[in-house]
Image (tube, helix red, strand yellow):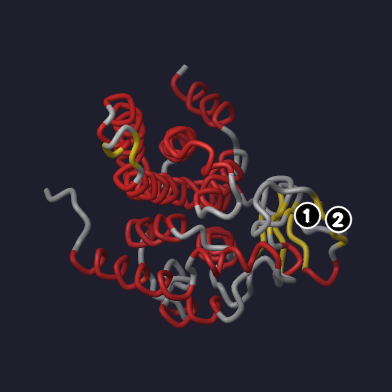
Amino acid sequence: MRFAFTDDQLAFRDSLRDLLAKECSPSHVREAWTNDTGRVPGLWEQLVDVGIVGLLVPERAGGLGLSFVDAVLLFEETGRHALPEPIVETAALGAALFGDTSRVVAAGLELVPWADTADVIVTRRGVIEREDARLSSHPSVDAARRLFDVDGPMTSVDATVAFDHAMLGVAAQQCGLADRMLELTAEYVRERHQFGVPVGSFQAVKHHLANARVALEFARPLVYRAAATLDAVHISMAKAKSDAAALIAASVSLQCHGAIGYTTEYDLHLYMKRAWALARSWGDARWHRDRVGRAVL
């Protein structure tokens, strides 16, 4: 048996990477921090056109009818670019809950990102149409992922499976974020010199980056396994480990960059703050470890 992604899956990932490199660059994400929607104008329509939004929707409903294994690399890529769009909420949760992605979905267990620009909102309490919802803005560390308290008449639904799919999508995004932060940091320590040599030649810097890379490489197989099984316990393992990998990568990246890593003018903060936000979304590490613990005891 061959445990590897197919050429088609890798090609789809690469084509999405090319699109996001052009249409979701750090400058685009920065603009999303300050514009009216927290999103990139026109990008959602392009994501629909390339098929990622309807990837998990059955063909009879107008989607591609593919599996989560086909989608996991794409979600990882959206994390790598800190995509400021409700892609996991619509393409993963919406596909599982509604069977189509004709409407933009905003979702969260409690606070809901992008609720002000969605067509329908899903929370732990139920589903509500955007026009019926009362929204109250809530502070967010990531200004391109604006949060809202949602109130109003909700329809109760069993969204357990859909929530699990969202958790897995976010776990994949965390792997992409960790990879991007380590890439930025490796580039920086190769270029930054102290005492006449690159900072990256110092043993302490090498060890920090190696530890972060090991954390990422341990998290990725758990995410990919969960994509294959869609087992709730496997998803919690993946979310806990990918959150840890992203947080370690953020910490190491910040430390290796030094003072420049704290500035909003430098791109690192776009990915670091998204990782911080996602680590507290769809269940934090303690919540997922508890779920795994209950399953094994």
Residue 239 percent location from the top left of the image: 47, 39
Question: Could you tell which of marks 2 and 1 lies nearer the N-terminus?
Answer: 2
Is label 2 in contact with label 1 (beta carbons under 8 Å)? yes
Query: How many neighbours does mark 2 have within 10 angstroms: few (below 14), some (14-19), or many (20 or more)?
Result: few
- Image height of 175 relative to 155, above or below: above
Mark 1 element type: strand
Cα–Cα span, label 2 and label 1: 5 Å
At a point 26% along the width and 65% down the height, the residue shown is: 9
Q: Would residue 123 be seen by someone viewing this image from the given angle? A: yes
Which quadrant of the structure image shows residue 199? top left
170 sits to left or right of 185:
right
Residue furthest to the top in view is 297
Residue that numbered label 2 is attached to: 136
| Outermost left residue | 1
Residue 198 versus residue 70 in the image, above or below: above
Q: Amino acid at mark 1?
A: Phe
Left or right relative to 226: residue 53? right
Q: Nearer the viewer, residue 101 or 79?
A: 79
**Residue 97 x %, y %:** 58, 61
Label 1: how many Cα within 10 Å (few below 14, some 14–19, many 20+): many
In the picture provided, is 213 more to the left or to the right than 295?
left
**Residue 85 spot, x, y in % from top left:** 58, 65
Q: Position of residue 183 (x, y in %)?
A: 35, 49
Residue 237's place in the image compared with 265, above or below, is: above
Question: What secondary structure is marked by label 2?
Answer: strand
Q: Give 193 or 98, whichever is nearer the viewer.
A: 193
Tag shown at residue 218: none
Q: Which residue is mark 1?
A: 148
Q: Pick the residue in front: 291 or 14.
A: 14
Give the camera-side residue of 10 and 187: 187
- Left or right: where 4 falls relative to 148: left
Residue at 44% in and 79% down: 60
